[in-house]
């Protein structure tokens, strides 16, 4: 008689970086669990195997990844774990250097080497798990990665070096994944990619994001679909028509513009002008009058003058973005921009980032004040500090505004929607009273 052998190995998967990395970790966890491993995510439990999924996007992210690897290398030296593996973007880009500098790691793997990592753990890659995926976020929302890689040639960006060329996933496969997620209670899908608007060009010879959205809207149980990381140049404007037509598609678009001065945009190789960006935003707001546009800006790019920065600030004042974040330029090896001098000093970069966020802070405060007295649909994520905390369709988790409801006065179930009367506003948060749930 065969006797099933129980593994003693416990695996802790540590995820650093963006939501795309998180999806990769969830796929890894799913495969390991299918091979009878006990797996935790970002846990302090007594795992004897640690896998660090790294980020290599900018200097701060790389520093965090290296520090995390060193932390677990020390734990391994002290006998706290048996095995340490590293995967993800940093490992993809700097594998040879990392092997020399941190030899305590048992093996390094790139972004597309999941089967090889599993083989190292004596686990089989199971293709039949399409649609199955562990969820490390709260169970009512999940990220859906619709493509890998990027074909753009932005001068400052190292993503194509780490993620390769754009590869779309088929609409049929993505619908299967969405149905599986919905069957487990997911109500909100956040579509992510390095570049959403390029979706489908490789598979269908056309920009197929509108068709994908229509297909996903047919999935029962999904109530919100949110769009992240759209590229503004040659933007397929029929996406706005889908937003206006499909109630499940949130009136929300995450579209990193990076800058607004024509000279800087040209040096960044963004393939768009200030006027074209303005026209695109005006078109979005014309077709979807209550759209929330989230963007990110990059300050301190080589050669950026004070006048060019001020034009960026003027652009932000004019456009009054609903949501905005700021990055400081990071001089990345092997990018096009690395061939020119990184001539904006760190203090100036930080100063410009702070000044731009001050501009946005006042805009955000004004926009939030305008919502006082309105009734909004809110999805509640967590309870914290005496408040139930949720989001409107205009807000993505962790990066955008939140709605706070006094838990002493009102009760809502986490993961449920409720109608909330907005009674107060701060720069980045709203306060409200539950009317119905």
Image (cartoon, rainbow, N blue to C red):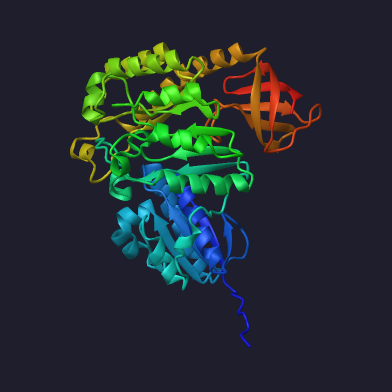
Q: Give the image quarter of residue 104.
A: bottom left
In this view, the residue farthest toward the left is 339
Residue 387 visible within the image: yes
Residue 18 visible within the image: no
In this view, the residue farthest toward the bottom is 1
**Observer-nearest residue: 332 or 376?**
376
Q: Compared to 270, does 314 lie above or below? A: above
Q: Residue at (26%, 20%) from the top-left corner? A: 273
Q: Residue at (49%, 23%) from the top-left corner? A: 245
Total marks shown come to: 0
**Observer-nearest residue: 282 or 44?**
282
**Observer-nearest residue: 362 or 13?**
13
Q: Give the image quarter of residue 285.
A: top left
- Residue 203 horizontal/vertical position (percent): 31, 44
- Residue 374 horizontal/vertical position (percent): 65, 14
Q: Compared to 322, does 73 lie above or below? A: below
Q: Give the image quarter of residue 142.
A: top right
Q: Is residue 289 left or right of residue 39?
A: left
Q: Residue at (41%, 34%) from the top-left corner? A: 211
User: If the image is split into quadrants, where does the C terminus sit?
Assistant: top right
Q: Is residue 381 left or right of residue 246?
A: right
In this view, the residue farthest toward the right is 409
- Residue 294 horizontal/vertical position (percent): 45, 26
**Observer-nearest residue: 150 or 307?**
150
User: If the image is split into quadrants, where does the N terminus sit?
Assistant: bottom right
- Residue 410 horizontal/vertical position (percent): 79, 28
Q: Compared to 192, does 262 lie above or below? A: above
Q: Residue at (70%, 36%) from the top-left corner? A: 384
């Amino acid at each position: 008689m065969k006797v099933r052998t129980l593994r003693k190995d416990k695996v802790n998967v540590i995820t650093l970086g963006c939501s795309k990395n998180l999806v990769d970790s969830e796929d890894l966890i799913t495969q390991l669990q299918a091979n009878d491993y006990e797996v935790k995510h970002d846990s302090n439990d007594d795992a004897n195997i640690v896998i660090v999924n790294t980020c290599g996007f900018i200097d701060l992210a790389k520093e965090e990844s290296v520090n995390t690897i060193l932390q677990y290398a020390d734990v391994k030296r002290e006998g706290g774990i048996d095995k340490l593996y590293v995967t993800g973007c940093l490992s993809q880009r700097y594998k040879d250097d990392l092997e020399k500098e941190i030899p305590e790691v048992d093996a390094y793997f790139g972004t597309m080497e999941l089967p090889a990592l599993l083989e190292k753990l004596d686990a089989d890659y199971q293709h039949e798990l399409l649609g199955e995926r562990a969820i490390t976020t709260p169970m009512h929302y999940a990220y859906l990665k619709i493509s890998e890689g990027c074909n753009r040639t932005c001068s400052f960006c190292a993503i194509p070096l780490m993620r390769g060329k754009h590869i779309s996933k088929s609409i049929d496969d993505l619908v299967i994944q969405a149905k599986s997620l919905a069957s487990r209670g997911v109500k909100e899908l956040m579509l992510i990619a390095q570049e959403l608007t390029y979706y489908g060009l490789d598979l269908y010879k056309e920009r197929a994001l509108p068709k994908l959205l229509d297909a996903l809207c047919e999935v029962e149980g999904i109530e919100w679909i949110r769009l992240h990381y759209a590229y503004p140049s040659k933007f397929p404007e029929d996406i706005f028509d889908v937003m206006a037509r499909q109630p499940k598609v949130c009136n929300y678009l995450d579209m990193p513009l990076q800058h607004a001065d024509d000279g800087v945009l040209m040096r960044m190789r963004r393939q768009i002008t200030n006027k074209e960006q303005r026209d695109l935003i005006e078109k979005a707001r014309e077709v979807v009058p209550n759209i929330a546009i989230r963007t990110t800006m990059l300050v301190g790019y080589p050669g950026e003058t004070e006048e060019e920065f001020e034009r960026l600030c003027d652009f932000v004042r004019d456009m009054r973005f609903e949501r905005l974040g700021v990055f400081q330029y990071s001089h990345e090896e092997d990018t096009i921009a690395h061939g020119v001098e990184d001539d904006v000093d760190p203090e100036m970069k930080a100063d410009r980032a702070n000044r731009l966020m001050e501009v946005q802070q006042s805009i955000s405060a004004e926009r939030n004040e305008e919502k006082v007295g309105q009734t909004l649909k809110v999805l509640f994520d967590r309870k914290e500090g005496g408040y139930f905390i949720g989001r409107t369709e205009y807000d993505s988790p962790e990066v955008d505004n939140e709605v706070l409801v006094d838990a002493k006065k009102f009760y809502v179930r986490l993961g449920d929607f409720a109608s909330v009367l907005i009674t107060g506003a701060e720069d980045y948060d709203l306060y409200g009273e539950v009317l119905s749930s």
